[in-house]
Image (cartoon, helix red, strand yellow):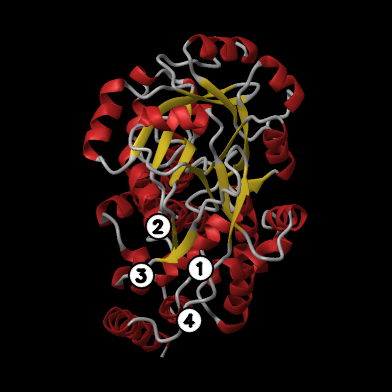
Amino acid sequence: MAGRIALAALVLCVVVATLRSRFGDIAPWPPERPLRIMMTGFTAPNFQPRAQLQEVPVGWLQTFGAVLAFAGNLAQQVGPKGAIWLVVLMLLGVAAWWLLAHLGEWRKPLLPLCILIVLQSFGAVYYLSSFLTPSRRLVTPFTAFDFHTHTLRSNGLLTPQQQIDWHRARGFAGLAFTDSNTLMPVAEISALRAANPDMLLLNGCEYHGDAHLVLLGLKSAISARDMSVADAIKAARRQGAMVIVAHPWSPAKYSIAQLIQMGVDGFEGWNGVIWSHEVAQVDKQRHLIATTATDTLSKSGSRCFTWTLLPRGLNNPDKVLRALRLRKTAAAFALNDDDTPETYDQRQARLKHLSGLPLAVRAAWGELAPAQRINALLGLLGLISLLVAWGAASGRPAAMSLGPSRAVDFLRRRRLVGRLSGCLLMLLAFLGSIDAALLTMGATFKATAPVKTNTLAHLTPLHAIVAWIILDGLYLYGRILWQRTR
């Protein structure tokens, strides 16, 4: 019965996606999130930049894969640190499964494998959601810019071209590449500019040390491996570069007053999903450069709350830098009408705790179009039905019959060797999964290794996903050896 429900849900998902593509959504889209403009450096009297958020049509594939879209939105809402609470909920679900297995003769869940797959799934949807069409994009006659991004060379998850595509889809007119302690080679950024004439591309780097400094207009990289914060600011000045303090609230080794005394040009008031009203006010009162940043895809994932607005008509990187030097910036950010700095910060803090999961689910659900919501419900029903069909079936699972029979028979006759082999394979699967995640997503390895010898820059999270699938198969085979040689 459960298997038939799962098949019916899959068919209905195809039907809903096809109808949505043919006739549009069957219900109106939820109300748009308001867009606010914070004036910072613009000095023209009565000047107010115009911008709005525009709905982006959702295609067939994204409607069909609404479960992935919902899971990706949820992963982005809770963030990497919030994944632990999803694991806690999963363990509660596995405990309920164990109870059903005890009372109703269900198959017992593979607890270690369940934990492994949940963590892998979280990492996969966190990354893959970056390629989904965003629900809204900014529309403005002014130049929308992002002055702080990361690629695979440091703690980003996207290639430079993927970063460009990510920003274009969300209404940005340009971005600055600011990998940690790393400057993109001139030949590479020249090739990217030639391939993307519609986007303004700046070269820079993020000094990643006791303070985080976004350095724009550099001629050569400035690294925390070579100099202190004060020396880095002086070196950037000698190159004619601008120094913007990234997320000045973290790390907090130096106060805002100390950094101003060292000679920085300005501060980020927005970074990822964090907004500091106090920092924005300091920029405005002291007439410093004020920017906003997505920091993609480092902390905020694929979510986009803010854009730095520059004057209209900027058509080359030099004009962008000149507008920045003249403090011609405004911050556009999407918040609810009733949000204040305090309520917004409280909600972001709650998302990192178990009590904030309902809030995260509601927010992730709100990003879906009506047809996607229908398919998300159908998809979840299908997945639950498949689990019920597998768990309620009697006998040994089909997966336990797989594998080279001669090897199993050989190890069965040597029980100790077989059990040790199975245990070793399961252990290798766990360690390999952790290692794959660190190598492809770990900021520390990439930020500290020299670019020319850093082969990690060529590894993407997609490599980790492929490795995870192989390692999960290795775990299952190790469990076969463990069970059959007992």
Is label 3 in a helix, a strand or a loop? loop
Q: Amino acid at mark 1?
A: Glu
Q: CA distance from mark 4 to mark 1?
A: 35 Å
Q: Is residue 114 left or right of residue 382?
A: right
Query: In this figure, what is the number of numbered marks?
Result: 4
C-alpha separation, residue under disc 2 versus residue under disc 4: 20 Å
Above or below: residue 429 compared with residue 113: above
Residue at mark 1 to residue at mark 2: CA–CA distance? 42 Å
* Mark 3 or mark 1, earlier in chain: 3
Separation of marks 4 and 3 at Cα, in angstroms: 41 Å
Residue of label 1: 367
The local secondary structure at tag 4 comes to helix
Q: Secondary structure at mark 1?
A: loop
Mark closest to the chain's N terminus, 2 or 4: 4
Question: Looking at the image, is 420 positioned above or below residue 57?
Answer: above
Q: Are marks 3 and 2 in contact (CB under 8 Å)?
A: no
Cβ atoms under marks 4 and 1 closer than 8 Å: no
CA distance for labels 3 and 2: 47 Å
**Is residue 204 positioned above or below 471 on the image?**
above
Q: What residue occupies the far bottom of the structure in this picture?
A: 1
Dividing the picture into quarters, in which one does residue 386 lie? bottom left
What amino acid is labelled 2 in the image?
Ile
Name the residue rendered at 67%, 65% in the picture. 337
**97 or 375: nearer the eye?**
375
Which mark sits nearer the N-terminus, 4 or 1?
Answer: 1
**Which residue carries the number 4 mark?**
392
Q: Nearer the viewer, mark 2 or mark 4?
A: 4
Visible residue check, residue 303: yes
How crowded is the residue under tag 1: few (<14 C-alpha within 10 Å), some, or many (20+)?
A: some
Q: Residue at horizontal 29%, vertical 57%?
A: 403
Which residue position is annotated with label 3?
A: 57
Q: Residues within 10 Å of mark 4 (few under 14, many from 20)?
A: some
